[in-house]
Structure formats: structure tokens, C-alpha cells
Amino acid sequence: MPDLLARVRTRLADLGERGRRRSSLLRRVPPLHVLLEWAARVGYGARGFVYLSAGVLILLAALGVVGDTVGVKGSLDWLAMRPLGRVWVLLVGLGLAAFVMWRVLQSVFDADHEGTSRHGLSTRMSQAFSGFSYAALSFAAFGLLIHAPEGDPAVEGVLRSREQAATVLSLPFGKWLLVGVGLAIFGIGAANVVKAWREDFTEYLACSPKTCRRVAPLARIGHVARGLAYLPLAVLVVFAGLKSSASDVTSLGAALEAVERQPAGPWILVAVALGFVAFGAFSFIEARFRRIRPPRDLNPLA
């Protein structure tokens, strides 16, 4: 397998070199590792835009300026319904696709040089799961180009979640599969909270120590907010699985609305919204300062 990959890389390199010699236009195209770096930075920027949009919409909902609370996917639905919405959604979808590509380079080809130690493999596995989630979000964005939302994004989000839950429940052992989905969501939320306290978010930033100290709290606040936002949704999905009731499943936005109806709920929602904004802001920081080192040797076994 490594010999086959080496031959493929050599062949592609030869073709690229021939093309550069024959075409002045191709000679102006940057090397592949530079293009991959640009794509990764665009991806971080797209992630930042999505979370910043979601945070602002959640904050406006908590303050009563807009209607129902929406989650990350709901913010794309809301964006698609605005003037030039499809253009924005297309750009976000392409940006998220670029981010998924970077996650593949990180998790499969070890772009961050995490290695194969227990911690390294755990980090790469986390990056792989992150890639899957953003791939789903990217596909959802492209889907909005074909079927733009017509009604309330919050309502459509709930209906979509219940349809997916009904599909899971129709499978063999569907009840326990849905419980497993809820536990997985809970695990993702808890992992974000743990990561907020343990991770050194400045490790991969190429900025001055002073700047790094200033931006690190944004990452910690953002991860705590993301983690806490998933927990109520996880609980609802687990109970829906135990009761085999797809109608009890809801969306992230509706789960946050349920939190808002509790004592001190509006303040909790404001805190989550500001956390999402912080996470989006840190993603923009990463788009500018993160060390991006695309692997020149695309060998997953290296």
C-alpha cells in the first residue's frame, strides 16, 4: 500500500511539473501545500461565521428581538431566507467543505504531528468525529440550495429531528440505537467542557505570547458553551429512545428554548449565546494565526 501511494504521488507530481512547463497559467498556481493551507484557513473562517451567526441569533431570541431560538443548523436555515441567502449559504457550504478536508488531513494523515501515542490517537479520533459533523453541516448547507426553507427554521429543525428519530426507531434495536445517539451527544458535550479546562488552545497559534494569552479565554468559554448546549438535547434524545417516542425528540434550538423556560433560563441562554460568539471569534483567530502544516507525504501509515 505505501509503495502504491508513493507511485501515485510521483505520477501526479510528474504530471503537475509537465503542466507547469507547458502553461504559463499553471506556473502561477501556488504549490499544493499552499493551496491546502489557504483552504484550511477558509474553513476555520467558515466555522467561525456559522457559530457567530448562531450565537447572535440565540442572543436575539433570548432578548425577545427575534422569534424562536435556533441552533447551528437553524442559523443556516435563517441565513438562506435572507436576501442573497443562497449565495451566503453556498459560500458557507464551500468553506465548511474546506474545513472537512483539513480535518481529514489532521485525523488521517496527522497534519498536526500528534503521532500514534494514546493521546495522539485520541486527538486524531476527535478530529475525525469533528470532520463528520461538519461534513453533515456542509451537506445541509448545499441542500438548502435545492430546497430553501419556507417556514420557521426552528419548527423545521424540530420536524427534521423527529423524522430522523423515527427512521432510527424503525431499525432493529432502534430504541437502543436512539439511546446510544443521545449518549453520544452527551459525550460530545461533556468532552467539550473537559477540553475547555485541559486543552492548551495556544499551542498551535503562531502569535505573540501576549496575543495568545488574550485569545485563549475565548476558546475556553466557547467550548464550555458548546458543551452545555448539547446536554439538554442529549437528555431529551435518551428519554425519547427509552420511551420509543420520536415525538419527544427535538432540535438543538428547541432544547435551548426548553432551558430558557426554566428559572434563570434566559440568563443561561444569554451565556450560551455569548459562548457561541466567543467560539466563532476564536475560529477567526485560528483562521489567521493557526499553524497550518499540510503533510507533504500523504501516507496515513507514516
Image: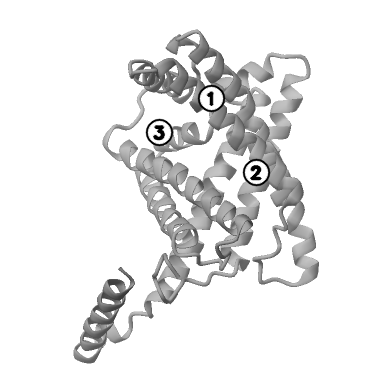
Identify the residue under disc 3: 81
Q: Residue 37's spot in the image, x, y percent?
A: 47, 70
Query: Whole-Å distance between the Cαs marked 1 and 3?
Result: 30 Å
Secondary structure category for the residue under label 3: loop
Residue indicated by mark 2: 277
Q: Amino acid at mark 2?
A: Val
Circles 1, 3 touching at the beta carbon (< 8 Å): no
Image location (x, y in percent) of residue 78: 46, 33
Q: Is residue 169 left or right of residue 115?
A: left
Q: Residue 230: horizontal and vertical position, in percent?
A: 60, 30
Counting residues from the start of the chain, the first of labels 1 and 2 encountered is 1
Dot 1 or dot 3, earlier in sequence: 3
The CA distance from mark 3 to mark 2 is 21 Å
Q: Say which element carries label 2.
A: helix
Helix, strand or loop status at disc 1: helix
Point out which mark residue 268 bears. none
The amino acid sitting under disc 3 is Met
Q: Is residue 250 visible?
A: yes
Q: Residue at x 46, y 49 (%)?
A: 131
Identify residue type, mark 1.
Gly
* Disc 1 target residue: 182
Q: Callout 3 environment at 10 Å: few (<14), some (14 to 19), or many (20+)?
A: some
